[in-house]
Image (tube, rainbow, N blue to C red):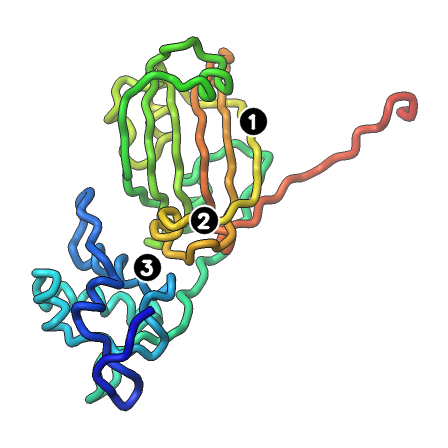
Amino acid sequence: MASAGVPTPYGDRIEVAEFAALVGRLDQQGGGPLHHKMSEAFRRAILQGRLLPNQALPAEREIAESYSLSRVTVRKALDTLVKEGLVLRRQGAGTFVSGLAAPAPERVEKSFARLSSFSEDMRSRGRVPTSKMLRCQEGAVTPKEAMTLNLGPGTPVYRYHRLRFADGLPMAIEYSTIPAYCLPRLEAVTDSLYGALAAAGSSPVRALQRLRAILFNQEQAALLSVAEGDPGLLIERSAFMENGRAVEFTQSFYRGDAYDFVAELTQVPAPGFGP
């Protein structure tokens, strides 16, 4: 928890050294503008309670020097949080944590009975899907994957760990294992996994899914800009091509405040009670 610093009319200003310790280092993996990485780090610190409501932030110049960034980069990062309502600028007093939680994403109603990709779901609702590749690598199938997908020991697979966004808001973390025979190369997946599979002639037509409630751990919460321990939904999907060969095993961790999963149910007459 942040300690008191320099008094201001609205709250104590945190010292820049403590501010940097609470916010932490910037994510140096992958591309993207530095001000986006800075705003992500600020956002996590606020949503996880490391920066307190009404806490006065250090001056932009001090933050810039602490992170070896330009003041323009810091100003752009803070501008993003001002637009989200997480940070307030007060004339003559400085910049403050508002104490308001970030607005939850508009809820998405997803059919649990229809086989569709994240990108398809978002585009069908007029939202812009994007992805951040956290990790991709080649390897051999694990015993669990081999059993789930009916693959032989040692089968080559590609693994993709991605953070999924809708209109710039983090919505889900996906861990996908794809048999190497489904794609021409590891780098074939850029944004849409199902788009890459379709281009390779490996589209799934059937899937088994399992849904359960989970609580986000620290790493997952940081990626999704929620608090550690917040509720989420885990869906495990095993998908197959028309010829019956396995094409996908994916574990998707969805924000609990962003999704409603629905399914249409029909009653099957019990034996002996039909017409």
Q: Residue furthest top?
A: 152
* Quadrant holding the N terminus: bottom left
Name the residue carrying label 1: 208
Name the residue carrying label 3: 44
For marks 1 and 3, give the one nearer the viewer: 3
Name the amino acid type tagged 3.
Arg
Labels 3 and 2: the sequence-earlier one: 3
Q: Residue 220 placed where, x, y %?
A: 39, 47
Circles 1, 3 touching at the beta carbon (< 8 Å)? no
Q: Is residue 263 above or below residue 273?
A: below
- On the image, which quarter does residue 50 sit in? bottom left
Circles 1, 2 touching at the beta carbon (< 8 Å)? no
Q: What is the secondary structure assignment of the residue under circle 1?
A: strand
Q: What is the secondary structure assignment of the residue under circle 2?
A: loop
Name the amino acid type tagged 1.
Leu
- Circle number at residue 6: none
Name the residue carrying label 2: 216
Q: Residue 51 placed where, x, y %?
A: 32, 69
CA–CA distance between discs 1 and 3?
34 Å
Residue 167: tell me if it is visible: no
For marks 1 and 2, give the one nearer the viewer: 2
* Quadrant holding the C terminus: top right
Name the amino acid type tagged 2.
Phe
